[in-house]
């Protein structure tokens, strides 16, 4: 059995092949694991390569006697690699052979481990080296550089080393390639099942890899030709059925790799030592750069760290993230997010920190902006803990599950869209973070800023307005909280090359009358129709944000001019017409109506509304079936400060399911969510 590897090194004139071989051998020879084949060449001894000089007769005699493993002719000379190479390979030594690309040997069945190493360099580098050498004319050099070179046969195991830097860097690249391929192990399927995970076994008495060096490594990547698998590492003692040159894989790992027994594979620590040092630095409280975070995020997403280390890193990052690092985190996220190119100088978007029941202004703002002529590819989320999200409301009238091509088609056709973000800029990293931080109730608004704006960047936006509602029950409690986070949005926006404006808004209560998809859609349509009974607060907030967005247009120039333009587009019906074009382009669905089961909660006596807990009302709407039942929800009939007569209606519960309807009515009876004057006690009627 040969455990040594024969490296057949080839490269065009000028790539520096001979120099790199010499430098690599100077670095590797002291290990005792590498030797260089001494070629027999029919030329006298001289400067340069230490070859064995022979005449034609001696070369021919040796050929007939089987003294060469491989031979070829070039430039009137004969070259031969000695058969003694096989002795080195059987002894476990790796052999470097200076070869010819034009005469690749067929050593199948003779050499167990054979790798072609191709040294290359960019054409500009080759030209400079050949000119400096001065052996050829300019025309000859040009002809050499433009000569067609056929690709190496796919059956061969080939590794490419680019020599476009200094000698030391080129030699280091060659040595790295040699060491990786010399340490490859032969795959063996173990008679072991690892259930859900993948496990690899390294032989304790291994000749090619020191298993002890992997004793403290949680995972490795097993990499073969065109295939790889990630696995936990165990060490097999001698006598466990694993040869010193093999790597054992459990049944599941072997199937995932998809290579036959005996296939040669390399192993790599995962994560890399450099990545682990970054993780340890962050856990210790050090600040990291964008490139540092990109390394860690990629390794986390690709599952290179065990859950315990992933949790430790993410919890520390979320707990300590502040303005000093938030730009670095946002930039790191964009490094592995594709960006949609719209080829327009201004592409607008808006975002709301959310949490305000009924505040469904996006369905009004997008058609106003699109009718004006700016592109607004808006993607929104479904509700997570609330009674409705923007995507849920739009889904009550149109398709929202657009892919990237669908978004592009709709936006190019009508200037805007209102699509679900689940098929577009879904973040696996956010999923991992949420799975760890939500159960622990760990939150950080700076992480949210980085996540939000990196997704806006990915969507191709250039200008963004952020709605930052504040109030006792909102995510942001005070105006100062809103201003502080607004500064972070604008800071990160500048770091990503976006123009971001953050606007603090009143988040003390619900906006509009409806809470639940169909009821909120009804409010939106009333505003777009300029109906007399349209919710005035919803209309005003929509115009506020439409004005800000339109002012990004140099032709508008100011927020005041944007306001006038937005009011005109709304009053003229242009916004409603554009909304219906967006619906048609995305794909209309049967309009969802409010649920047929209704129950009205009334005031027991004449009084004044002192408080409306929109968040509790949203909970009642969820109990009624929202947002999954898009017709379920609450139709709010009063506002804070309103006076109500005895038995006056406060809100109506809508549902379709009798069981959910009864549960919502019961919840409203226990706590209606609306406070009246001190003497009034709410009762369902």
Image (tube, rainbow, N blue to C red):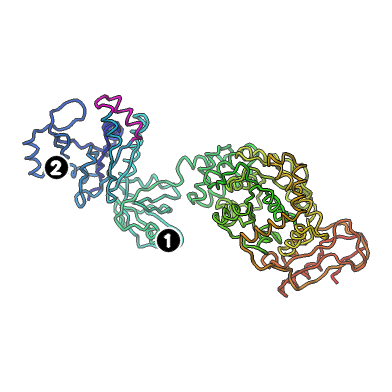
Identify residue for label 1: 194
Q: Secondary structure at mark 2?
A: strand
Percent coordinates x, y for residue 673 in the rendering: 81, 61
Can residue 30 be seen in this snapshot?
Answer: no
Residue furthest to the bottom in view is: 658
Main structural element of the magenta stretch: helix, strand or loop?
A: helix
Give whichever of 249, 610 is nearer the camera.
610
Q: How many marks?
A: 2
Identify residue for label 2: 68
Give whichever of 513, 543 is nearer the camera.
543
Residue in the image at 8% along x and 39% along y: 60
Percent coordinates x, y for residue 217 in the rendering: 44, 47
Magenta part of the chain:
121-138
Left or right of 332: which side holds 196?
left
Q: CA distance from mark 1 to mark 2?
A: 47 Å
Give whichever of 228, 410 is nearer the camera.
410
Percent coordinates x, y for residue 575 in the rendering: 72, 54
Residue in the image at 70% along x and 65% along y: 626
Give whichever of 423, 491 is nearer the camera.
423
């Amino acid at each position: 059995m040969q455990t040594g590897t024969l490296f057949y090194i080839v490269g065009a004139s000028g790539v520096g092949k001979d120099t790199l071989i010499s430098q690599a051998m100077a670095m590797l020879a002291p290990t005792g694991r590498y030797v260089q084949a001494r070629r027999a060449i029919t030329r006298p001894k001289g400067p340069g390569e230490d070859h064995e000089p022979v005449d034609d007769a001696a070369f021919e005699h040796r050929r007939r006697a089987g003294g060469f493993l491989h031979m070829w002719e070039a430039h009137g000379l004969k070259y031969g690699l000695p058969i003694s190479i096989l002795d080195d390979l059987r002894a476990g030594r790796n052999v470097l052979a200076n070869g010819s690309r034009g005469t690749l040997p067929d050593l199948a069945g003779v050499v167990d481990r054979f790798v072609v190493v191709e040294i290359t360099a960019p054409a500009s580098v080759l030209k400079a080296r050949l000119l400096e050498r001065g052996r050829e004319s300019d025309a000859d050099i040009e002809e050499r550089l433009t000569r067609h070179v056929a690709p190496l046969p796919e059956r061969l195991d080939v590794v490419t080393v680019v020599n476009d830097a200094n000698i030391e860097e080129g030699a280091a690249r060659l040595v790295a390639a040699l060491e990786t391929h010399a340490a490859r192990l032969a795959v063996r399927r173990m008679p072991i099942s690892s259930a859900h995970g993948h496990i690899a076994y390294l032989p304790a008495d291994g000749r090619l890899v020191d298993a002890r060096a992997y004793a403290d490594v949680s995972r490795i990547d097993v990499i073969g030709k065109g295939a790889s698998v990630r696995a936990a590492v165990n060490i097999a003692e001698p006598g466990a059925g694993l040869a010193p040159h093999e790597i054992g894989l459990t049944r599941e790992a072997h199937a995932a790799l998809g290579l036959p027994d005996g296939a040669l594979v390399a192993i790599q620590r995962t994560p890399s030592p450099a990545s682990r040092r970054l993780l340890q630095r962050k856990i210790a409280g050090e600040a990291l750069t964008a490139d540092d975070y990109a390394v860690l995020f990629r390794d986390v997403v690709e599952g290179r760290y065990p859950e315990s280390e992933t949790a430790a890193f993410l919890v520390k990052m979320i707990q300590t993230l502040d303005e000093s690092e938030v730009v670095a985190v946002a930039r790191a996220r964009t490094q592995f997010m594709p960006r949609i190119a719209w080829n327009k100088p201004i592409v607008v978007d808006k975002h709301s920190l959310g949490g305000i029941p009924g505040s469904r202004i996006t369905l009004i703002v997008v058609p106003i902006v699109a009718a004006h002529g700016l592109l607004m590819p808006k993607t929104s989320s479904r509700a997570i803990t609330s009674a409705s999200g923007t995507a849920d409301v739009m889904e009550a009238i149109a398709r929202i599950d657009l892919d990237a091509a669908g978004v592009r088609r709709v936006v190019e056709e009508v200037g805007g869209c209102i699509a679900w973000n689940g098929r577009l800029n879904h973040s696996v990293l956010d999923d991992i973070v949420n799975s760890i931080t939500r159960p622990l109730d760990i939150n950080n608004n700076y992480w949210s800023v980085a996540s939000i704006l990196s997704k806006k960047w990915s969507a191709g936006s250039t200008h963004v307005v952020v709605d930052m509602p504040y109030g006792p029950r909102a995510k942001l409690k005070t105006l100062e909280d809103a201003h502080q986070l607004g500064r972070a949005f604008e800071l990160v926006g500048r770091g990503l090359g976006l123009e971001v404006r953050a606007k603090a808004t009143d988040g003390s209560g619900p906006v509009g009358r409806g809470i639940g998809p169909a009821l909120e859609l009804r409010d939106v349509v009333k505003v777009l129709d300029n109906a007399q009974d349209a919710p005035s607060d919803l209309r005003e907030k929509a115009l506020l944000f439409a004005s800000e967005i339109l002012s990004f247009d140099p032709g508008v120039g100011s927020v005041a001019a944007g306001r006038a333009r937005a009011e005109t587009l709304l009053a003229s019906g242009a916004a409603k017409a554009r909304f219906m074009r967006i619906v048609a382009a995305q794909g209309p669905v049967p309009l969802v109506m409010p649920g047929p089961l209704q129950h009205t909660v009334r005031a027991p006596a004449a009084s004044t509304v002192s408080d409306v807990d929109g968040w509790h009302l949203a909970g009642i709407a969820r109990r009624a079936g929202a947002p999954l039942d898009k017709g379920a929800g609450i139709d709010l009939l009063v506002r804070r400060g309103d006076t109500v007569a005895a038995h006056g209606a406060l809100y109506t519960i809508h549902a379709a399911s009798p069981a959910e309807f009864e549960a919502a009515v019961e919840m409203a009876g226990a706590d209606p969510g609306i406070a009246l004057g001190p003497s009034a006690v709410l009762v369902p009627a």
